[in-house]
């Protein structure tokens, strides 16, 4: 079950600001998908260590730009960068948790998990080809559900977003029309709809607009008491978004084999229980640190999260990494992330 967690609204999320002069805050920016879990980890980490985390939940695109500009200790993105992109900016990349992107709807009389959608239907809605909820194509997979004939208002992200990347990559896989006309990306040219900044913006627009559909990370859907749709997975089964269905989607990921860049997607994974719109969230950090203390502090925070943060992640319905993946990540830290003197900032043990 979800434990209450405050997801801050706005560009800046201050997570446990330091109150002592002995330790500076860790700075990070990016993914709103990851903001709930980093917020929970930061709260507990601050209580134990006295070190705070200032995290700007500005979307994956913003996080990538800020880490490339070296204005934060780490960037956070739900779209993994390629090996070439990482090399060009002297970056290491590693996953932290896996979650699910969930279609959320505001349809009077239709509760959570009552509406069923397929990938092609979702793409047709976001292309503006299906414009009313009682369209025969929707009705055909929702027999027995009383869906009103309301016009559909599409809600999407207005900022550069890794959540959008996962969502549009899935639509591209399921709809040739979407792949040709729009494609996958952190920022795309949306054919129709209203844009909201961040997952909180999409949540707010969807909650306020009767007949709307949006997409958010699952923690936002639960925290905001939003009605979600069941999605048809690769095996043809309509599944709910749950930690179990996200876990099923992540079961086939071979993280150790994906080292050192860990460029893994979890879209439309096989398995009768798998949620089809799943994905990891990643951290970006410079391999060659100009400030050993700051770089080491960022690594210590995530190492602490891997050791102590699984319970918080499960409470928010994220999927935690297996110990083999954490071990592979620590080896990459030890081998690739170094201080100004060329010495490793982390020692695997």
Image (spheres, rainbow, N blue to C red):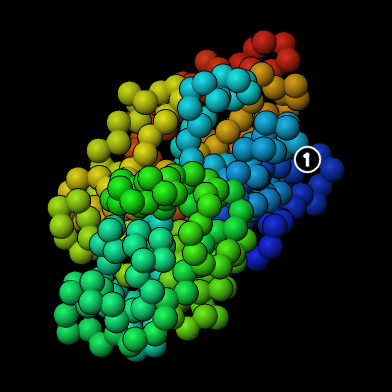
- Residue at the (71%, 56%) spot, across then down: 12
Binning the other alpha carbons within 10 Å of mark 1 as few (below 14), some (14 to 19) or many (20 upward) gives some
Q: Indicate the position of residue 138 as horizontal and vertical percent values.
A: 25, 73
Q: Position of residue 274 (x, y in %)?
A: 24, 52
Horizontally, is 300 left or right of 16 in the view?
left
Is residue 248 among the parts visible in the rendering? yes
42 relative to 328 in the view: left or right? right
> In the image, what residue occupies the spot 55% across and 80% down?
208
Relative side of 69 to 246, left or right: right
Residue 121, given in percent of the width and then of the height, sits at: 29, 64
Count of all numbered marks drawn on residues in the image: 1
Q: Which residue is pictured at 30% across the width and 36% down the height? A: 253
Residue that sits furthest to the top in the current view? 342
In the picture, the quarter occupied by the N terminus is bottom left
In terms of depth relative to the viewer, which is nearer, 197 or 31? Answer: 197
What secondary structure is found at the residue carrying circle 1? loop
Can residue 300 be seen from the camera position used here?
A: no
Horizontal and vertical percent for residue 233? 22, 55
Q: At x 72% / y 11%, what residue is drawn?
A: 341
Check disc 1 and report the residue beneath it.
Answer: 24
The foreground one among 7 and 311 is 7
């Amino acid at each position: 079950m979800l434990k209450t967690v405050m997801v801050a609204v706005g560009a800046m999320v201050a997570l446990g600001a330091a109150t002592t002069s002995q330790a500076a805050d860790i700075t990070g920016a990016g993914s709103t998908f990851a903001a709930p879990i980093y917020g929970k980890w930061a709260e507990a980490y601050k209580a134990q260590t006295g070190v705070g985390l200032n995290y700007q939940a500005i979307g994956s695109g913003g996080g990538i730009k800020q880490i490339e500009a070296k204005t934060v200790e780490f960037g956070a993105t739900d779209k993994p960068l390629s090996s070439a992109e990482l090399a060009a900016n002297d970056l290491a990349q590693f996953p932290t948790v896996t979650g699910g992107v969930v279609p959320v709807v505001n349809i009077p009389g239709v509760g959570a998990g009552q509406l069923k959608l397929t990938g092609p239907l979702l793409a047709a809605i976001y292309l503006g080809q299906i414009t009313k909820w009682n369209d025969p194509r929707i009705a055909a997979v929702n027999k027995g559900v009383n869906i009103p004939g309301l016009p559909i208002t599409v809600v999407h992200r207005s900022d550069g977003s890794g959540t959008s990347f996962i969502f549009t990559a899935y639509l591209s896989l399921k709809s040739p029309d979407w792949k040709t006309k729009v494609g996958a990306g952190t920022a795309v040219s949306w054919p129709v709809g209203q844009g909201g900044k961040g997952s909180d913006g999409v949540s707010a627009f969807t909650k306020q607009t009767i007949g709307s559909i949006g997409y958010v990370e699952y923690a936002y859907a639960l925290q905001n008491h939003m009605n979600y749709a069941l999605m048809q997975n690769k095996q043809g089964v309509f599944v709910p978004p749950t930690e179990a269905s996200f876990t099923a989607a992540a079961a086939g990921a071979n993280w150790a084999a994906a080292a050192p860049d860990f460029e893994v997607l979890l879209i439309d994974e096989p398995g009768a229980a798998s949620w089809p719109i799943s994905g990891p969230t990643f951290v970006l950090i410079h391999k060659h640190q100009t400030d050993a203390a700051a770089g080491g502090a960022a690594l210590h925070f995530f190492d602490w999260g891997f050791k102590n943060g699984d319970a918080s992640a499960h409470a928010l319905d994220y999927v935690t990494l297996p110990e083999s993946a954490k071990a592979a990540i620590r080896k990459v830290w030890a081998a690739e992330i170094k201080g100004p003197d060329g010495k490793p900032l982390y020692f695997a043990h």
